[in-house]
Amino acid sequence: MKLRFLIPFLSVILLLSCSHQGNNSVQSPDGSIQLNTGLDDGRLYYTLKKDNKVILDKSYLGFVLKDSSLKDNFRITTTEERSFSEQWDQPWGEEVTVDNTYNELKLNIEEKDGLKRKFSVVFRIFNDGFGFRYEFPEQENLKDFVIMDELTEFALAANHKAWSIPYNTEFYEGLYTSSEMNQLDTVCTPLTMETADGMFLAIHEANLTDYAAMNLYPDSSSTTLRTYLTPWSTGEKVFMKTPHATPWRTMIIADNAGDLMLSRLMLNLNEPSKIEDTSWIQPGRYIGIWWGMHMKKYTWEQGPKHGATTGNTLKYIDFAAKHNFQGVLVEGWNKGWEDWKSFEFTTPYPDFDIAKITDYAAAKNVKLIGHHETGGQTKNYESQMDSAFAYYQKYGVNAVKTGYVGGKLDGKEMHSSQYGVRHYRKVIETAAKHHIMIDNHEPVMPTGLQRTWPNLMTQEGVRGQEWNAWSTDGGNPPEHTTVIPFTRGLAGPMDFTPVIFNFDNPVLPQTRVRTTLAKQLALFVVLYSPLQMAADMIENYESNPAPFEFITNCPTNWSKTVIPHAKIGEYITIARKGRDSENWYIGSITNAEKRELSLKLDFLDKGARYMARIFRDDKDTNYQNNPYPVDIQEIEVTSDSLIELNLAEGGGTAIIIEKI
């Protein structure tokens, strides 16, 4: 991480408690957002306005502890204010430089009498939203304690339209649905909302560290959302020891749906990188021995159809080298797949020669991407974790996909509980010691930790492509990928695994990819992941090389991102500029409706000439019965040009724009 510009206005103002029992306020740097706080009969609250419109009415804060409560009887002892501004560079991301500018208000709180326990609430107000967290200092009367409930509220000003999935959706692999806010179940975050006057809001959290994930549920008698922390199996929410801080509770406030995706508020509320030398952290494209298992061509476990054989892996490495893929993922290489529980992470099956494979890959300038499926058996994994990563490091493997299929962790704890949060962090930090990047499947919902641990490249936590292989509901509907960029995508990179070229499903013929082929290309740009998989079996790419050219040319690390079109559940267009060239890559997708969009290229350099290669749905293409035809066209363009995007039902367009 590089700090490019820093103005630490650290003139902190300490104010006497007697003068600040009333309202305290702080504004965003541009003055558009105003947050007010105060005490109401000893209860701490905050309110929020944007351009003088009420976003949040009086929203109360506090906790229920195991043996008492921290929800009233408060006084504000002092307040502290500061302004801060920096620009920092990401080792990888959707752009290079992130602006981190905010105004901060810190309220130091103490109980009026009794134990006089203390905590602080820190509010940071950005131009595109805000975050706040509770901080518990070390103190005599609050050392080790148990949180039974967090009482944080978001008292929204109206009954907004919201997109959500229930918090107990297994691995977050659900279809987001829209409803009025007061009709919600208990839902996970990010929770994305649209107001009646066209404003967009997204509630989430940042820097989830040694705490339980935040979920939300509505108060049926109002438009207030309340917090529900994912519990331990024994009912407690969080075991805490001072000094400690909660995650940041965040809200993005945007004038349009696309700006939700461009907010870096969550990243800014995480700590700077703990990895000084990030040169070994490298984004890239990869293929893998994976889709063949879902199509029942291969098996994970050893046997006559075993996929992870030395010969098959060498074949995939050859393909990767020929088409400039950086990695090959291999699942099913190690003992334990017979029961999906007793995995051994340093014991390959006899037909998988890891030394020969990694030597061959190195000679071809390709990396083996490792795989640690745990079956959700975290204790088994943790007992082998250090040796497992050391084993891969010895063979030059610098990226590992982890998995937790198998219900609750160790049959007991939820993935998003404090137990799960602690486990996932241990994986990330242990992998970093061995210079290994992580692609985490079945995760806790991401909260921006990739800023602090940039080896955490991407995560699943989304209903991805695999549901088009085995879901009995027929697969992902066409609108699914026009919703998740604005919901799950706000939490960070997602390993959706796009780019299936053969939609036939011999296992479940009624279940299949419900897009056009051109939309599969476009998803490679739209659904951001710095480790991006072309998920199909290589023979399906070999038989259709013309559209595959888009994938073999498309990078996964970007210097700039713009969003010309965005409507949740209907369509989205994203243009991204590669970090290592002057070229732009565009993906545009629609739901089940045919659509025409006009794409202005005003993001290109003025006065420059470009050649655009357009991969679009053919005139008769549709996702239902004619998904494959792709029309490929080349035209010269400039920043003044306009490209008409004719998206078929369930279709898309992908474009490469190269500077001449």
Image (cartoon, helix red, strand yellow):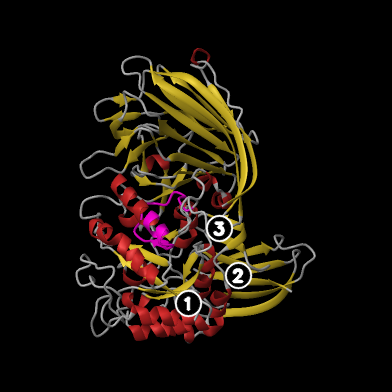
Query: Which residue is more in the foreground, 455 or 618?
Result: 455
Left or right position of 189 against 278: left
Name which of mark 3 and mark 2 comes first in the sequence: 3
Query: Residue 233's x, y, as percent?
Result: 22, 45
Please tell me how crowded label 2 is: few (under 14), some (14-19), or many (20+) other residues with Cα within 10 Å. Answer: many
- The amino acid beneath tag 2 is Asn
| Residue behind mark 2 | 646
| Residue behind mark 1 | 366
Query: Residue 604's x, y, as percent?
Result: 71, 63
Going 55% across and 58% down the picture, which residue do you hit? 91
Left or right position of 533 against 234: right
Element at badge 1?
A: loop
Query: Residue 635's x, y, as percent?
Result: 71, 76
Mark nearest the camera among 3 and 2 is: 3
Q: Is residue 608 above or below residue 456?
A: below
Q: Is residue 526 above or below residue 261?
A: below
